[in-house]
Amino acid sequence: MTAQLNPRGDVAVLVPAAGAGVRLGPGRPKALRLLAGEPLLVHAVRRLAAAPSVHTIVVAAPAAEVAAVRDLLAPVAPVTVVPGGAERQASVAAALAAVPAGPEIVLVHDAARALTPPEVVESVAATVRAGHDAVIPVLPVVDTIKEVDAGEVVLGTVDRATLRVVQTPQGFRRAVLSAAHAAAADALTDDAGLVEKQGVAVRCVPGSEYALKITRPFDLALAEHLLAGGS
Ligand code: C5P
């Protein structure tokens, strides 16, 4: 029996949370690192569960931590926990395989984006519901971007007006995501990349500064500061 949140919701959210978090320095798997006294995964799942469209959440946890993650999340929200894989894409595929019949919209959300507001979840889901097969939240690029060669010499300046920084949750019509994963040949860093390879148009919607990916120690300090400010 798969755990359910809102039975009238039409969205399943897959949460890849099986990464080691090497860039954060030595310690527990990244999703279990503490932010303001609670694991990143708890913060992420609490915000997902607050989005009214969400019917089901499936977390892909480090294989050795599945039971611990189940216990950790039981008081937060009804979630299904499965063992993740060696790469992010394998973790997403494992979570996708555990989605029950029902939800026709599937979102994929990195546990590392622990402060993503429920409004972004709703906006991505609504845009899929409105007829887009694939939807990603994005921010404009604020820095000047240069392309460099192997010797760190600049080859040229990229027009940042045409670039976007991509966040999660990324949303898909369920059949589109399933087909893209079934056809996946190379490991990519996001799911929209897989559906792009299938020739599917990917629509951008505004993301949120709060959806930052907590990757390095500075990001963790920034997230602590944002939380202390009452986000
Ligand atoms: O480190 P990376 O950018 O790949 O992590 C993005 C997300 O994918 C994180 O939430 C991480 O826990 C997850 N991941 C995973 N399984 C892996 C590697 C990363 O679920 N094998």
Image (spheres, rainbow, N blue to C red):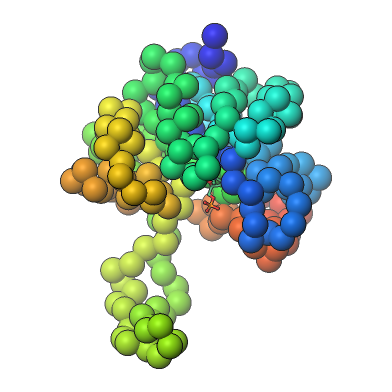
Which residue in the rendered view is the most extreme toward the left? 199
Q: Residue at x 42, y 52 (%)?
A: 189
The image shows residue 21 at horizontal and vertical percentages of 64, 53
Residue 129, visible in the rendered structure: no
Hey, which residue is sitting farthest right in the picture? 37
> Relative to 71, is 141 on the left or the right?
left
Q: Position of residue 114 (x, y in %)?
A: 61, 46
Q: Name, please, the residue furthest toward the bottom.
A: 153
The count of marks equals: 0
Is residue 62 visible from the viewing direction of this image? yes
Position above or below: 136 against 159: above
Query: Quick one: quadrant of the N terminus?
Result: top right
* Residue closer to the observer: 178 or 208: 178
Horizontal side of 44 relative to 86 (left or right) equals right
Q: Is residue 158 above or below residue 175?
A: below
Left or right of 140 in this view: 72: right
Q: Give how far across and how far down residue 39 sits, in percent.
A: 73, 42
Q: Residue 123 location in percent, x, y?
A: 41, 40
Residue found 64% across the figure and 24% down from its top: 77
In this rendering, the answer to whether 2 lies above or below 168 is above
Q: Nearer the viewer, residue 131 or 72?
A: 72
Which residue is painted at 58% across and 30% down in the image? Answer: 83
Q: Nearer the viewer, residue 27 or 133?
A: 27
Picture residue at 21% right of the left edge, 43% below the top:
198
Task: Classify residue 180 as left or right of residue 60.
Answer: left
